[in-house]
Image (spheres, grey):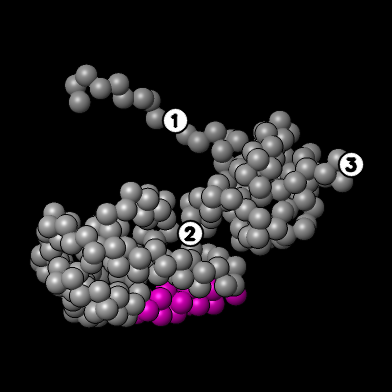
Amino acid sequence: MQGARIPRLEAKSLKAQCIETLERLIISGELAVGEVVPPERDLAKRLGVSRPVVHESMVELASKGFVSVEPRRGVRVNDFWRHGTLAIFESIVLHSDGMFPDGILADLLGFRALIELEAVRLAVLSRAAGHIDGLRGVLAEEEILPIPSGDGDGARARTELDLRFHLLLAEASGSSILPLVMNSTIPVYRSYIARFYASKPDLALVRGFHRDLVAAIAAGEGDRARSVAQAMLDHGAVIARKEASTRAGAFD
């Protein structure tokens, strides 16, 4: 550490803040697909930035696929849900904080199930001792963590441990790609897991899912492992939908 070159921390640039704000507006649907974005002069005034900052932000949003610049017509929001790229997926994960238009939460939960069930299937085939030991280590830590209360340290500790459990499952698959995919979704799933534990779930049930899943993987029982994993994901999805519904009601 003594010889490390530590960079000076700087606040986000106005351009970065402008892009983030516009991405949030588009992802949330406040700037709807097909809608013409306000002219740069008006947008600059409303955002409190210069026109060059808005112009550069629009260029980057266009490069990601969020908007299209139409000569003499202005800037129009693209149907990015249908034609977007991984760059847009990254923005959705980073900027949405779990507030998605109708149907997107279900799609994300379905995507998570697709990835994790495949990870479990491959982990059963691999059964690498090192990975199984790592998962058992998480189980041991779960047993000694205090019961979380609200948003305190206990909830944060369980959130990070739960996230580590799922990342270890991806590593246990033996795939070089699945851990990268899981890592790319960390921000949104950390948010969901945190709210899951803030809802004060049945911790014995959660620990039971984890314990039974590791036991099935270690024993090479593919059908049992998939059944436990599916039940675990279904349980989390029910709470996520209920929590999202509660949050949406609070904003009505």
What residue lies at 72% left-to-right and 54% top-to-bottom?
78
Can residue 174 be seen from the camera position used here? yes
> What number is the disc on residue 72?
3
The amino acid pointed to by label 1 is: Glu
Q: Nearer the viewer, mark 3 or mark 1?
A: 3
> What number is the disc on residue 92?
none
Helix, strand or loop at mark 2:
loop
Q: Is residue 50 left or right of residue 181?
A: right
| Label 3, label 2: how far apart the Cα atoms are | 35 Å
Q: What is the span of residues highlighted in magenta in the rendered image?
A: 234-252
Q: Is residue 242 magenta?
A: yes
**Mark positioned earlier in the residue sequence (3 or 2):** 3
Quadrant the C terminus occupies: bottom right
Residue 72, above or below 100 = above
The amino acid pointed to by label 2 is: Asp
Q: Which residue is mark 2?
A: 97
**Mark positioned earlier in the residue sequence (1 or 2):** 1
Q: Position of residue 12 (x, y in %)?
A: 50, 36
Q: Nearer the viewer, mark 1 or mark 2?
A: 2
Q: How would you rate the neighbour count of disc 2 (Cα within 10 Å): few for under 14, some for 14-19, many for 20 or more?
A: some
What residue lies at 19% left-to-right and 21% top-to-bottom?
2
| Label 1, label 2: how far apart the Cα atoms are | 23 Å
Q: Residue furthest front?
A: 125
Q: Position of residue 191 (x, y in %)?
A: 39, 61
Can residue 146 be seen from the camera position used here? no
Front-most of residues 109 and 160? 109
